[in-house]
Amino acid sequence: MNKILVTGMGIISAIGVGKAATVQSLLDGKSGIGSIKYLKTKHIELPVGEVQCDDEELKAIAGYTSSKPITRTSLLGRVALKEALEEANINLCRPRKLAFISGTTVGGMEKSELYYHDFLNNDAHNEYIAMHDCGACTDMIGKQYEGKFDIVTTISTACSSAANAAILGANLIKAGYVDAAIVGGTECLSKFHLNGFNTLMILDKEECKPFDKNRQGLNLGEGAAYLVIESEESVQRRNVKPLCELSGYGNACDAFHQTASSATGEGACKAMAKALEMSGLNSGDIDYINAHGTGTGNNDESEGAAIMRIFGDKIPPVSSTKSFTGHTTSAAGGVESVISVLAMINDFIPNNLNFSEKIDSLSFSPVKECIRNVKLSHVMTNSFGFGGNDSSCILSKL
Amino acid sequence: MDIFIQAASQISTQEPLSEQWFDSPVFSEKILNESIDPDFKLYIPVMVARRMGKLMKRAIVTSVDVLKKCELTGDSLEAVITGTGLGCIENTEHFLNAVLDNDETCLQPTYFIQSTHNTISSQIALFIKCHGYNTTYSHRGTSFDACVLDAFVQMKLGMISNALVGGHDEMTPAYFTLLQKVGYWKDAPLTEESFHSANTAGSISGNASLAMVLTNKETFDALCKIKAVEMLYMPSIDEIKAKTNAILQANGMKLADVDAVVMGFSGDKDNDEVYKNIVLQITQNIPAMCYKHIFGESFCSSAYGVYVAATAIARKKVPAHLLYSSKDEIRNPRNILVYNHFHNIDHSIILLSCLD
């Protein structure tokens, strides 16, 4: 009786609001990457994975009726959290103890960058000052459920934040701190991030091509996704139907470079190996890998090398759904875990868009066409962040 | 299985990498306080340090110093867990200003690279070559507390046997100005005598750079045991009371066994009111300790709450200057409860005990 079960999920990204729209886009091969519509930036030449709603529309979806200002990151989080809680039936029958652990890096930056000169020079937008930090963003999502959460915290490990939220949540359940945890992340597009990635020269000016020999970089995305994970005992007591099991997870540090991964994928290997060890599975048991696959020269080669080291000559189907959503950074671990479970439940493997030619040093190509009617028992999803913060999670069918 | 704080190292407004504050603390009569830095080049090669901001250097130096005390290396260390409310905010401001001032053109990546919150934890791992578990908590005033909880839980589950846990934050002049607009800081400095009696809004700003090693192996020279770590979200006073009782009961203790309670009295009226209520309703006659009058307020200042409690247990006394109300030093404190809250939203309770 110590399985960690998934009982609810919520998602919002460039490919849709909610799980149904997300599955439809994936099955239809419909990418959400396109021209910038909402973010105020001069870099309109850069394609992004933008959620197709302005803040007012997001407020309506999230049921946010307060006149108090709120950041876009928090609004995205509220939308995903609402869907996850509804599916897990939290309102009808609460777990005894519940944690909310959210990953973010941007936090309130998208508002700070709009009003920073006002912050310094006048008092026109002071209400956004205390919303800037990561924790404030989580708090603005969590405090609507006053009295419901027992532990609330924020993880900020860049692009692996949401995966590390899942790891803490699962550990808190195993140690008996809580019966259930809502884990994931949220991140909106910001001028700060777009320009930051642009200075690193890792943004593709066209739609990204993960695992392609001629890949030119990533497309930034935005979104939020949360999973409700729960102890077996709580699932039985609440009489809810679990979707799948979080059977293994691992976190390791590449300790190689602040923004580059080691050629051999040291941290990635260790994270995947730890996840496999915890799950008690062999590498041959994994039916699909939802790769980190950003589309940068460095990541895909390094991650590919790590996958080859772990899986040898029996590499399962691999795809990067960042070719649909863009790189949702701190939310990516959540977005891609939810996509992995959706694939498992709906018996399909999403394809890796825009692929045409294999990377020379890799022995495998990603999935080119969506594979339907396939039974997936175990799916691995990778999330790697700046600074070599590498995490890997395994989701298993019950 | 018991979990221990093996050692700690700090850089703050007090003498760096030292416990001098315990015997002769310095009281600053400023609102924005700078840390006293050690000679960084004794710890970090000049070429490497050149690319690091002050906060990053402090994080590296405190980490290296505490690991040395514990004879741990990148190979034997199993986890690096860092709390930071703002990350390397100095770099964030640099890059943000450049984006705005240059209208998104002619930007250099360096400040962006160093701006993400996890830069600290990953640079520590890079510096000591540690491939173990690595994560970063950025949750306002309980960022450090979450690190302790994470390490504690993983040790209880047998996933790790040691961890470097840190709390690192800096207050830049610009961010100080912004937070001043929304009531974080006092308008005028306080004297040592008036610190706890001012009864006005705002507190005194400080920086936090504190690194600790937690381990599940007892050695004769550990500072103390960590018996319990709990976090609460928007709790009522009754829930704080129930959690306190549950912690004590689980450890076979009564309230009378607690020698002191550490609280984050900051001089801010609303902040202090919450602690006063905990004293009134829960801890009553147990002497209350304070620390923000000498270390200042920051998102990671709670790290100093744990640190002063651990140091007091290890040094077998609570000196009078750490006491909030009574002025009689406490001899041989065996058990200390550490309460922390941020805006009465996020709370934590940590129980520390002496070695057997």
Image: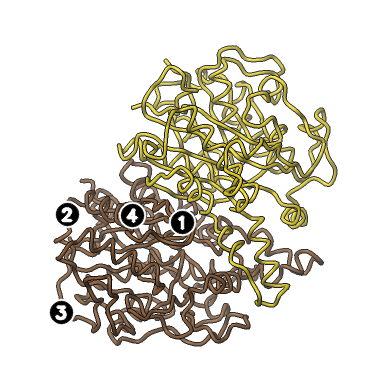
Chain colours: A brown, B yellow
Residue at image x 64%, y 58%?
A: B91
Amino acid bearing label 1:
His
Q: Which of the two residues, B307 or B344, is positioned nearer the viewer here?
A: B307
**Residue flagged by tag 4: what amino acid is it?**
Glu
Residues under labels 1 and 3: Cα distance?
41 Å
User: In the rendered image, which quarter is residue A286 located in?
Assistant: bottom left
| Residue closer to the observer: A84 or A157 | A157
**Residue A397 visible in the snapshot:** yes
Q: Gap between marks 3 and 2, in whole Å?
A: 23 Å
Decide: few, some or many residues near mark 4? Use Cα within 10 Å; few <14, some 14-19, many ≥20.
Answer: many
Mark 2 belongs to which amino acid? Leu
Q: Name which of mark 2 and mark 1 comes first in the sequence.
A: 1
User: Marks 2 and 1: which is nearer the front?
Assistant: 1
Q: Which residue is mark 1?
A: A257
Q: In the rendered image, which quarter contains the C terminus of chain B? A: top left
Instruction: Give how far apart the Cα atoms at labels 4 and 2 are.
Output: 20 Å
Q: Residue at x 38, y 47 (%)?
A: B131
Toward the right, the furthest residue is: B188
| Picture coordinates of residue B248, whole percent (x, y) | 45, 26
Residue A281 is tagged as 2
Q: Is residue A114 above or below residue B198?
A: below
Q: Are marks 2 and 1 on the same chain?
A: yes
Kindly indicate whether the residues beneath marks 1 and 3 are on one polypeptide chain. yes
Q: CA distance from mark 4 to mark 3?
A: 35 Å
Residue farthest top in this picture: B331
Residue A266: give its label. 4
